[in-house]
Image (tube, rainbow, N blue to C red):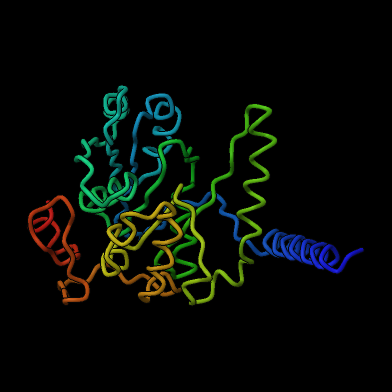
Amino acid sequence: MKPAARAYHTFAFAWLAGKAAVLLINAVHFPRLRPQPLPADRPRVSILIPARDEAANLPHTLPGVLAQGANEVIVLDDGSRDNTAQIACQLGARVVRGQPLPPGWFGKPWACQQLSVLASGDLLIFTDADVAWHAGALGAVLHELEASGADLLSVQPRQSNRTIGERLLTPLVDAAVLSYFPYPVITLPQAAATIANGQVMAFRRGALERAGGYALVRRDLLEDTQLARRLKARGGGWPRRWGGTPSGCGCTALTRTRCAGFPRTCCPSTCTRARCCC
């Protein structure tokens, strides 16, 4: 065997062995959420759903979200061409029409930015319209957040595979995600050692706003992981206990930001949201 071919085979074997080792570590250590009752001392929770042309999914997923016991559920209709807004309203969610996409933004970060401004919760949970929430799911998220003390909890939902193609492809996607980083590395404070899944992202509001919100990733295709990394780089996301929203603004030149689509520059904290950004 030629030296170049031998080096290639050695590299390929080492890469596959490394992936297999990470997958094995995560199979043992990766946290698994179990249904839990809602904590009695929970913060105010907003579940936020960006939705575009989701009329086929919402009848199956939205009732489960509404049954979780959150303080509010907001669906943002992001320019749907079907009856997404009507269905969400009929099912009992608060529905808002999304504003036109401003220059310099991609669609999902802009939808999530609008939802974060509209929400009143201390804990903001962004979830995709095609994610089904079963009984006790919100309690599981809140218990895991409290146990970890983190500012951001990202969840990898279990995939529902109905067709042969889904059953063949989905395990490959899950294997790729679960072999990306070993879980003990993900828990390190270094920003590069971070991965997140935008299907479910639960933020402590104060940490998200202090970091700059979704404006940080306005033009990122992988806005979920990039936002998680930037949150951690700014001191958020690393374990700490319930902090709640500060009673004072605490707005500095570093945290001051322009809420895109709104006329004024604002301090991204709860006390100024209503009079500055809405």
State the image coordinates of residue 206 (x, y, percent, origin top left).
Answer: 28, 67
Q: Looking at the image, which is closer to me, 72 or 269? A: 269
Q: Residue at x 56, y 54 (%)?
A: 33
State the image coordinates of residue 96 (x, y, percent, origin top left).
Answer: 21, 37
Q: Residue at x 27, y 24 (%)?
A: 86
State the image coordinates of residue 54 (x, y, percent, origin top left).
Answer: 38, 29
Residue 254 appears in which quarter of the rendering? bottom left
**125 horizontally vs 191: left or right:** left
Q: Is residue 5 above or below residue 170?
A: below
State the image coordinates of residue 59 (x, y, percent, origin top left).
Answer: 41, 26
Q: Looking at the image, which is closer to me, 220 or 139? A: 220
Q: Identify the image quadrant of the N terminus.
A: bottom right
Residue 170 appears in which quarter of the rendering? top right
Q: Is residue 231 above or below residue 174?
A: below
Outermost residue to the right: 1
Q: Looking at the image, which is closer to me, 248 or 163? A: 163
How many numbered marks, from 0 up?
0
**141 horizontally vs 208: left or right:** right
Q: Residue at x 63, y 28 (%)?
A: 162
